[in-house]
Image (cartoon, grey):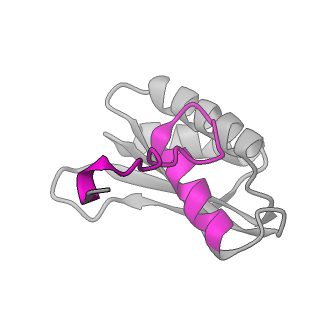
Amino acid sequence: MGLFSRRQKPPSRGAFATGHAGDDQLLGILSERSDLASPRHWVHFLYFSDESSARTAAASVEEAGWALQAVQPAATDSGDWIVIAERHDAVVSPDAVREARIYFESIASAHPGADYDGWEASL
């Protein structure tokens, strides 16, 4: 049997189905390195075109139970503002990730020029 005649397994798609490929990939990395049931630090990043939008969004995020790590000018020359939301001791499950993406994308969509730039979590 030659090298090219062997059957190869198709690439794994992962065990997660959050509806967002990047989120599924991050969950896969987390699950390979730690137990997803373990609480961890979870951080989300939103960008806004102006300070007023950033502060309005930050107030909504805080009302929803997220702590604010930062509301400040972004480290770019664009004049954008960044809102960094976080939770400590969060369990980052596929359902929680899906719900967080829906929530943060809705916050961004309420402000012209805003963007939800995703999340990260500690191992």
Seen at 84% across and 63% down, the residue is: 37
Q: Where is residue 22 in the image (x, y as percent from the top left)?
A: 46, 46
State which quarter of the image contains the N terminus.
bottom left
Seen at 80% across and 59% down, the residue is: 91
Q: Nearer the viewer, residue 23 or 121?
A: 23
Q: Nearer the viewer, residue 47 or 7?
A: 7
Magenta span contains residue 13? yes
Q: Position of residue 51 (x, y in %)?
A: 39, 46
Q: Which of 112 and 8 is in front in this view?
A: 8
Q: Is residue 116 visible?
A: yes
Seen at 74% across and 44% down, the residue is: 96
Residue 84 is left or right of residue 37, and the answer is left
Q: How many marks?
A: 0
Most extreme residue toward the front is 1
Image quarter of residue 122? bottom right
Residue 74 is left or right of residue 71, and the answer is left
Which portion, as a residue range, is magenta? Answer: 3-32
**Relative to 101, is 75 above or below?**
below
Q: Where is residue 33 in the image (x, y as percent from the top left)?
A: 64, 75
Q: Is residue 123 visible?
A: no
Image quarter of residue 49? top left
Image quarter of residue 36? bottom right
